Image (spheres, helix red, strand yellow):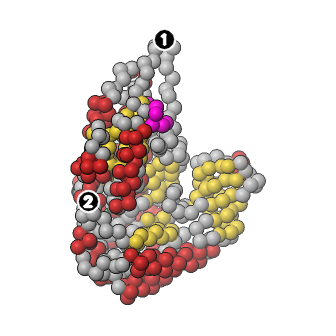
Amino acid sequence: MCALETTDPPVPRAVTKTKAPKVGFVSLGCPKALVDSERILSQLRAEGYETAADYAGADVVVVNTCGFLDSARAESLDAIGEALAENGRVIVTGCLGAEAQTIRDVHPNVLAITGPHQYEAVVNAVHSAVPAPHDPFVNLVPPQGVKLTPRHYAYLKISEGCNHRCSFCIIPRLRGDLVSRPAADVLGEAERLVRAGVRELLVISQDTSAYGVDVKYRESEWRGRAVPARITDLAAALGELGAWVRLHYVYPYPHVDQLIPLMAEGKVLPYLDIPFQHASPRILKAMKRPAAEAKTLQRIRDWRIAVPELTIRSTFIVGFPGETEQDFRQLLDWLEEAELDRVGCFRYEAVQDALANALPNAVPEEVKEERWHRFMAAQQIISARRMQQRVGKDIAVIIDEVDGEQALGRSMADAPEIDGSVYLPAGKGAKKLKAGTVLTARVTRADEYDLWAEPV
Ligand code: SF4
């Protein structure tokens, strides 16, 4: 079960508080699913439901599933099974919910199944399972909503769905085409988060650079001015709020170049999470991704000239159908030239219903495994080299937790959960720090992923 930090609002003395129904929540999958969970919980909390800390204390359990990879689908089905065994009253939502029959085949006794971002349908299903309480004094929810992340950072979802059709991906089928939120809604939510103590906003979507394409960059009013629903305008406006702004899932469109000046000006963090997936033009074409690897190398060079401290994170797939040893070597050579800072690598997985499964020349599992290890070993050397360049420099660090006298934080180059950490050793003022503190520290040591630093 998810650990939820919920502070009950005070109950006026003259009023007897009726027992609020309790909802258990299991949130699986990516940060986008986490934001969906937060939205559902915020709505339920606003209606007076409480959150149960365990299965036994819940009147009903909502399982927010992931359906991206077969392994995630299996995990989701297991989580539903566990909730049924432990509690018995289960509502399923999220990506796997788009395949109601798959769920019913395994778990015929779930109370209701709703698909991804069907917030209203989930909430209605909860109403049917456990009626909402009628106590106006519990109809209170913090203005920033209920967050599942620590208080000092929060994910900010700017759109749903995706207009691309990458051949290995079923997200557009699960989540539909791109639907962007109005800029004023996103900015309003960001303002509430910052007022509530959030120091770092993590902008997420399936395709952050496409933000607003579906609504033709429609303007909406924020702080008395019109803000277009365009990623550069949105990022610049978010940069006015005084929090760190980190952009995730930036598809490599040409107009990404326009985000670089915002990084140079310090409006958004010098951090680009940009999935390249491969470097062989043949494989990129089969993936239905932009195949301009040489141009991309030049763009990376230009970005680094404009913003020398830029961190580039990316993800790749090895063992895609038809990938030859030559394609793979091309990828390794490209990686060596690109010198990316942070890299994730997946072995190709034949996700059910993905178009790529029909491509010829599937790569045997042992070859995928071998390529994955070679890829990771090559990147480890690059990462270590990049990290060593930071030793001796003064960097900004945001503290995530303090344990005794040791503090654990992240630099601007580290997104929560997926990147490295900065260790601030015992003494040297570390115990005065708390989660959310931003300070300057001098890097004393580095390995492939993490840094050690002393506050200055
Ligand atoms: S851009 Fe991302 S979400 Fe969209 S189809 Fe490609 S991999 Fe899937």
**Left or right of 384 in this view: 133:** left
Q: Which residue is mark 1?
A: 14
Magenta stretch, overall SS: loop
Name the amino acid type tagged 2. Pro
Taking the image in four quarters, ligand 1 sits in the one at: bottom left
Quick check: 351 above or below 365? above
CA gap between label 2 and label 1 equals: 52 Å
Give the answer, above or below, for where 314 lies relative to 111: below
**Magenta-highlighted residues:** 49-57
Report x, y in % for residue 358: 23, 73
Q: Nearer the viewer, residue 62 or 285?
A: 62
**Measured from the top left, where is residue 289 in percent x and y?**
29, 73
Q: Is residue 16 visible?
A: yes
Q: Which residue is mark 2?
A: 172
Point out residue 68 in the picture as x, y percentages from the top left corner.
33, 59
The residue drawn where x is 26% and y is 55% is: 174
* Residue 306 visible in the shown view: no
State yes or no: residue 360 in magenta. Answer: no
Considering only order in the chain, which callout, 1 or 2, is on the residue closer to the N terminus? Answer: 1
**In this image, 211 relative to 313: left or right?**
left
Task: Name the side, left or right, on which 201 lies relative to 430.
Answer: left
Q: Residue furthest bottom?
A: 326
Q: Does the magenta segment cover residue 54? A: yes
